[in-house]
Image (cartoon, grey):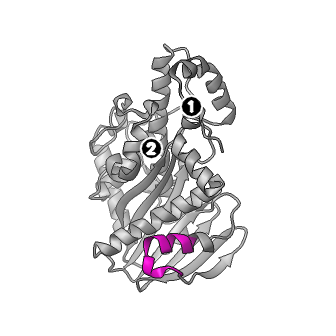
Amino acid sequence: MRLVLGVDEAGYGPNLGPFVIALSQWEIDSQFDVLQGLEPFAPEFKDRAISALKAVSEYIPMGDSKKIYQPGVGLGGLDLALRFLGQESLQGFSMKVWGDADLKRVESRLWYDPKLAQRWEDNSNPASSESAEDSSGETALFQRGREKFRKLGISFGGFRMRIIDEQFFNEECHRCGNKSNVLGEMSLGLVFSNLKRLVEAGESTWESVEIYCDRQGGKKRYASLLSHAIGENFPEESNPWIDVLEETPHVSRYGTIVRGLPITIRFQVDGDSLFPSAASSMAAKWVREVLMDRLNRYWHEVTGGTVRPTAGYSVDAHRFEKEITPWLISLGVIREHWWRLK
């Protein structure tokens, strides 16, 4: 039995909105090779968006969230995939479980107030979406998905997340020096803090651990970040040996041993072409878009409906800033609290 952890993020580049890092947990009791990519999951799973015109999808989306999420269509594809994974995990489908470490801080921001939530609450499924309505067709699709998981010898164990609001992002960038270091520290901190949680819960019955991460920008060397993250979470490993297996323009790969567990860590360009990171990509994107919906709803109400929604990216973010400036002044909101400076 192998423990497999996948990591990916959403919202690294924008000026507005949260930055979300997601971790997915899996167990593999077969010889299945993660590097085969997504092809073995077909036809029950496909790396593409679902048609908004079909009442029931013919497949479950699984892949890079940028391919599955379509702004003009909505979150239907991500909703469907995450509902399926929620059924596969006892952890269920709850942001209070996924991002409990950050939720109180994030929701203290005016524009992320939970009263603005429409798409998800403290329940086990996405809300107010036609695709959330159960049907015999969807039940059959999910059954085929579970059969495919069993055939491949994999099982899903749930998500964990870091949800970083704008003010906290700016503070962490100041502490770390740049946002690349923030991404590296938080991603690997999420990985090894959860590995520690699993090990200390007595769940370490695995022969080995595999960690798959999307390549983080142009960074090619991760040994020092790995050493820091392991030492922070496993103090007895204060100076862990990190074996550099490969550092190429496409892949960075490392090996180490923590509490007797052999661990390999892989950072790969287009890492979300592998199922562990793909699932994390979808979950992170879904949470970011839901929080962006709150942000846009807040400013719509404050401005009396005069401001157009934003996705938070550079040019449009500056347009949005210009439109809400009169209200920012009247509210006395400090720019560092709502605008990501790096």
User: Quarter holding the N terminus?
Assistant: bottom left
Instruction: Say which residue appears at 56% left-offset and 23% top-offset.
Output: 328
Instruction: Say which residue appears at 63% left-offset and 36% top-offset.
Output: 313
Tag 2's secondary structure? helix
Q: Circle 2 sits on which residue?
A: 287
Q: Left or right? Give the position of 57 relative to 299.
A: left
Q: Is residue 154 visible?
A: no
Q: Amino acid at mark 1?
A: Ile
- Along the line of sight, which residue is nearer the eye, 300 or 145? 300
Tell me which corner region of the image, top left, top right, bottom left or bottom right, holds residue 307: top right
- Horizontal and vertical percent for residue 315? 69, 32
Task: Give the extent of the magenta segment.
Answer: 226-239
Instruction: Say which residue appears at 51% left-offset and 69% top-offset.
Output: 229
Q: Main secondary structure of the magenta part?
A: helix
Q: CA distance from mark 2 to mark 1?
A: 25 Å
Instruction: Say which residue appears at 55% left-offset and 62% top-offset.
Output: 185
Decide: marks 2, 1 in contact (CB < 8 A)? Answer: no
Tell me which corner region of the image, top left, top right, bottom left or bottom right, holds residue 251: bottom right
- Horizontal and vertical percent for residue 193? 42, 66
Q: Residue furthest right?
A: 249
> Could you classify mark 2 by the number of other residues whose Cα lies within 10 Å: few (under 14), some (14-19), or many (20 or more)?
many
Q: Is residue 318 magenta?
A: no
Q: Amino acid at mark 2?
A: Val
Q: Left or right? Give the position of 181 relative to 96.
A: right
- Horizontal and vertical percent for residue 38? 52, 62
Q: Looking at the picture, does residue 37 appear above or below residue 319?
A: below
Q: Looking at the picture, does residue 205 appear above or below residue 155?
A: below
Q: Looking at the picture, does residue 140 appear above or below residue 112?
A: below
Q: Earlier in the sequence, mark 2 or mark 1?
A: 2
Q: Circle 1 sits on which residue?
A: 334
> Could you classify mark 1 by the number of other residues whose Cα lies within 10 Å: few (under 14), some (14-19), or many (20 or more)?
few
Q: Looking at the picture, does residue 22 appear above or below residue 1?
A: above
